[in-house]
Image: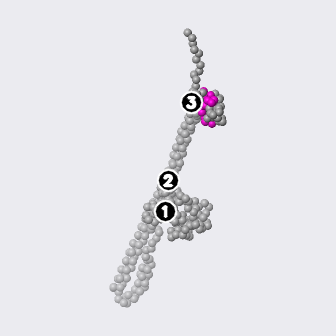
Amino acid sequence: MSAESSGPEPGPLCPEHGQALSWFCCSERRPVCAACTGLGGRCRGHRVRRAEERAEELRNKIVDQCERLQFQSASITKYVAEVLPGKNQGAVSTASAARELVIQRLGLVRSLCESEEQRLLERVHGEEERAHQSILTQRVHWTEALQKLDTIRTSLVDMLTHLDDLQLIQKEQEIFERTEEAEGILDPQESDKLNFNEKCIRSSLLTQLWVTAVLGSLSGTEDVRIDERTVSPFLQLSDDRRTLTFNAKKSKSCADGPERFDHWPNALAATSFQAGLHTWMVNVQNSCAYKALCVRVAGTSSQQKILE
């Protein structure tokens, strides 16, 4: 019984020349045979390498890549095992401190608001009592004045109807005194002391909180665009029609029109608002030459001036 020796199985052959693919064409990035690189071959003149050299190079690259992947895996494992737990604990601690800070700050604000509320309500009550007392005092005063005028009038009418000429002449001094006494009672005059003074509720804290609340509720609710036909020559309008920049020198490129502000650096919004209070942020830098303008809209057709 004889045994035939078996060698390695032949690899794929070149479909064009039927030879072993023992070379690698670097230009076409594919394995080729020796005939492909020779005269008349399609890879003549190309940069070629032995297939085993290219394979060894790839094996080295795979080894290097596996090492990098191993290092990357180790780094990720360490990050998950060591860094993330610390981050989680840090987030828990920071969140706890943030909660305490929120509670502390809001507690302070709440305490200040409660104190300010009590102070302002006491001032309102005091002002109400003052106005009420002034009104009562006036009521007593004018009631007495009415009684006095009625007494004087009754006395004068009695003299007029019951005294003869001689008696009336003899009462001349008394008539003069009664008349003078009546003239001393002046007509009532309007007085601020009788009105409730709304200035009693003035509070910088309340104003700041109110403004903050109003601006916060209005933030981003309106998409304001500027009507370029109304822009003053002293203003430059941005491409998105939302920003105006002041220019000290009058622009000559603006076409004249009945809608355009030609003297003051003003502009109008392109659309009107239905109702409510609307605000704009104006950066005046170091200039003092500006006026704050607040527009409360009541109608539906008028455009609103937004910079003056």
- Label 1 Cα crowd, 10 Å radius (few <14 / some 14-19 / many 20+): some
- Is 27 above or below relative to 245? above
Residue range (magenta): 20-35
Observer-nearest residue: 188 or 210?
210
In reply to whether residue 191 is colored magenta, the answer given is: no
**Which residue is at 58% across, 17% downward?**
6
Residue annotated with mark 3: 15
**From where the camera sits, is residue 148 visible?**
yes
Q: Secondary structure at mark 3?
A: loop
Observer-nearest residue: 287 or 13?
13
Q: Separation of disc 2 and disc 1 at Cα?
A: 40 Å
Q: Separation of disc 3 and disc 2 at Cα?
A: 90 Å
Among numbered discs 2 and 1, the one appearing first in the sequence: 2
Mark 3: which amino acid? Pro
- Is 239 above or below relative to 18? below
Observer-nearest residue: 262 or 96?
262
In the rendered image, the residue lying farthest to the left is 162
Asked which colour scheme the image uses, the reply is one colour
Between disc 3 and disc 2, the foreground one is 3
**From where the camera sits, is residue 82 visible?**
no
Among numbered discs 3 and 1, the one appearing first in the sequence: 3
Between disc 3 and disc 1, the foreground one is 3
Residue annotated with mark 1: 270
Question: Could you say which quadrant of the image residue 3 lies in?
Answer: top right
Q: Separation of disc 3 and disc 1 at Cα?
A: 74 Å
- Is 153 above or below relative to 198? below
In percent of width and height, residue 240 lies at 53, 58
In percent of width and height, residue 145 lies at 41, 74
Horizontal relation, residue 277 to residue 49: left or right: left
In percent of width and height, residue 304 lies at 49, 64
Residue annotated with mark 2: 113
